[in-house]
Structure formats: C-alpha cells, structure tokens
Image (cartoon, rainbow, N blue to C red):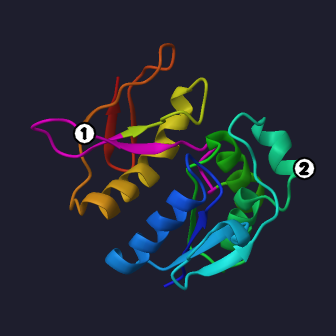
Amino acid sequence: MLPVAVDAMGGDNAPAEIVTGARRAASELGIPVVLVGRSAEFGDTGGLEVIEASEVIAMDAEPGTSVRRMRDSSLVRAAGAVREGRASAMVSAGNTGAAMASALLRLGRIRGISRPAIAIPVPVPHSTHTTLLDAGANAECRPEWLPGWAAPGWVSCRGRFSQGRPPRGPLAVRAGAARRVRADGLHLCP
C-alpha cells in the first residue's frame, strides 16, 4: 500500500503536532505515512520516510498564486508525491484553498466532476453517519455540481464508516442552488 503524504508544515503547532499525529497513525493504525516539509524542524520522525520541501504556504496566503510560485512548498510537494505514484493521497491541516489548488493543478480533475468539494463527517446524535459536502471549497454552489460530488462523497462515507448501501436523505445546499437531482443511486434533495 502506498503511503499517505502528510504536509508536516501545515496547521497549528506544525510541524511538531503533525509529526506526532503521523507517527501515531503509522504505529497505532498501521497507515503508511511519508512526511513532507523541512525535516530539520521535525524532531523525531519515528523512522517515517521524508520528502524534503523548503517552502511553506502560510494560512493567510492567496491559494492560487502561492501554489504557482512556491513549487517547493510542502503542499505542492505532497500533491506531487501523489502524481508521481509515491503516495496514494495527501493530507494537510494548513491552508485549505492552497491544498485544493495544489491538488487541482498537480493532479487534475476526475472526469465528470467539474468542481472539487470538501467532505467532512458531521456528528449527529441518534442518527446514521452524516457527511457534509461541500465544507468550504466553493464560495457558491451550483445544482449541476451536486451529482459530481455524490459518487466520491459516497465512496468516502463507505470507506470511513463501512456502510453497505448508499444513504438516502436530505442534502442542504446554499441558497440559489436548490433543486432535486439524482446521481448514482443517491437522492439529493434540498
């Protein structure tokens, strides 16, 4: 199994907390990890593989410009590791817009999906597992984007929560983008 490329320089208390979390994922869950960033700042990596990156995209940096100009940033190098087949996925707790831009510019789009979306699990008492799509990748959502999010959203839910069948239920969408659509067996309704 290919490792997950972890942007060790992104997020609060990076890189120390990110490296600690990556080490725990590797040791407790058996998830192979490759750390990306300035290894001199990592401390004890616990033997995890490292991909060097000399630059860091700040949380307040403009995403598109930063990704294009900072080609040796930990975010861009993590996306590059996926593109080159050195990693199966990338993870960053850093600049969300830059993570999305890095993935789009380095990896491209999946056919049939015109816009990316961020999926996050939402805790709901006394309910089945709920996933929120889109949690911030797009300032405005359009109805035609929803079917493109349904299939990858379901795959994410299935992998994370081991659900056997696609859920059927409401989908809350931003104002101006509400209408009924059906995609890949999922009923998405406002």
- x and y percent of residue 189 in the render? 33, 28
- Mark 2 or mark 1: whose residue is earlier in sequence: 2
Taking the spot 86% from the left edge, 53% from the top edge, the residue there is 70
Q: In front: 46, or 144?
A: 46
Residue occupied by mark 1: 123
Taking the spot 48% from the left edge, 36% from the top edge, the residue there is 134
Left or right side of 63 for 143: left
* Residue 30 appears anywhere in the view: no
- x and y percent of residue 35 in the render? 61, 71
Left or right side of 51 for 66: right
Asked which quadrant contains residue 14, the reply is bottom right
Identity, as a three-letter code, of the amino acid under mark 1: Pro
- x and y percent of residue 90 in the render? 59, 63
Marks 2 and 1 close (CB-CB < 8 Å): no
Taking the spot 44% from the left edge, 19% from the top edge, the residue there is 178
Q: Is residue 103 above or below residue 137?
A: below
Considering every residue shown, the one lying at the far right of the view is: 69
- x and y percent of residue 27 in the render? 38, 80
Identity, as a three-letter code, of the amino acid under mark 2: Arg
- Magenta highlight range: 110-131
Q: Main secondary structure of the magenta part?
A: loop
Q: In front: 30, or 55?
A: 55
